[in-house]
Amino acid sequence: MVYIKSCKSIYKKEQTNMAASDLALIPINEVIKDIDVSEIDAIICATVTKDYVYPSTACILAGKIKASNAFCFDIESDFTGFLSALRLAYAFVKSNRYKNILVAAVESFYICDDKDRFDDASVAVLVTNEKSDIQIDFIDSVTDGSALENCYIPMGGTAKPYTKEGVLNKEHFISIKDSSIFEEEAKKAALYVKDVLSSNNIEPNYYIPSYSSKAAYDNFVNALSVDKDIVYSKMEDAHSSLSASSGVALSMALEDGFIKKNSKVAVCGYGSGYTKSVAVISIN
């Protein structure tokens, strides 16, 4: 079995100008306060807004918490970053080779000047083989690689390196082709979640969607066709935090009592047409 020993987050409701590693460190310090960091086998950090192109933000975090025995890497999975990192950690622990994987998802939006679209946030969990009240039962995800220009950063990679003109034109910032894509993707994500859960004979007691806008949240709930009372709504008006969104919502739902004991929860991630993911966890 694979468990989550601790889940903590911070949602800033603004753009902070903090380095991603500094923002991630806030919930990480809460998650690791009762463990020996030398026993952390790996650190996986999901982020689009990393501290540097190189080294990885996970590597920087390992240095800051002195986790000298951990192997570290970042992943970029856009709006499903937290769930993608969780899926990797789940597989590592399930392999019986590793015992403790620290997962972080963080976004600090220096790469966006749209203050009405994105907010800074971070979440951290410790995935372990040590029994706890939160058990990971199932994770699935899919990717649509055909939606490149829906939401991306045009400049800064090998396809289009940095130029002075490009920086002046803010091509190193997030570019959104059409904001309606978030609402449409929410519908597709709900149908995907319904299909995956039905195919695997899973009936959750609660649903926790990632957040991006009120319209996207409403579309997701309506397409899901379940009682709204079992869908977490605290973040329905929140601005997106990309990789961190679904993890932050999960952390809040755990802390505010929305999730009851002896229940199954579907944590759902979706975004601008790239990725969709669902994780099912049991709360005991």
Image (cartoon, rainbow, N blue to C red):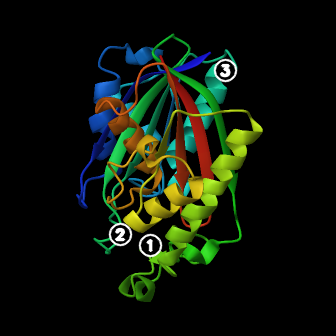
Residue 93 or 55: which is nearer the viewer? 93
Give whichever of discs 1 and 3 has the lower sequence position: 3
Tag 2 residue: 117
Badge 1 vs badge 2, beta-carbon distance below 8 Å: yes
Looking at the picture, does residue 142 appear above or below residue 139? below
Q: Report the amino acid beneath label 1.
A: Ile
Task: Report helix, strand or loop for mark 1.
Answer: loop
Q: Position of residue 83 (x, y in %)?
A: 55, 42
**Which residue appears at 42% of the width and 55% of the height?**
211
Give whichever of discs 1 and 2 has the lower sequence position: 2
Task: Report helix, strand or loop for mark 2.
Answer: loop
**Which residue appears at 25% of the width and 54% of the height?**
18
Label 2 crowd bin: few (<14), some (14–19), many (20+), radius 10 Å: some
Tag 1 residue: 174
Tag 3 residue: 94
Q: Report the amino acid beneath label 3.
A: Lys
**Which residue appears at 31% of the width and 55% of the height?**
120
Name the quadrant containing residue 200.
top right
Label 3 crowd bin: few (<14), some (14–19), many (20+), radius 10 Å: some
Separation of marks 2 and 3 at Cα, in angstroms? 37 Å
Residue 172 or 204: which is nearer the viewer? 204
Give whichever of discs 2 and 3 has the lower sequence position: 3
Label 1 crowd bin: few (<14), some (14–19), many (20+), radius 10 Å: some
Q: Report whether 215 appears left or right of 177.
A: left
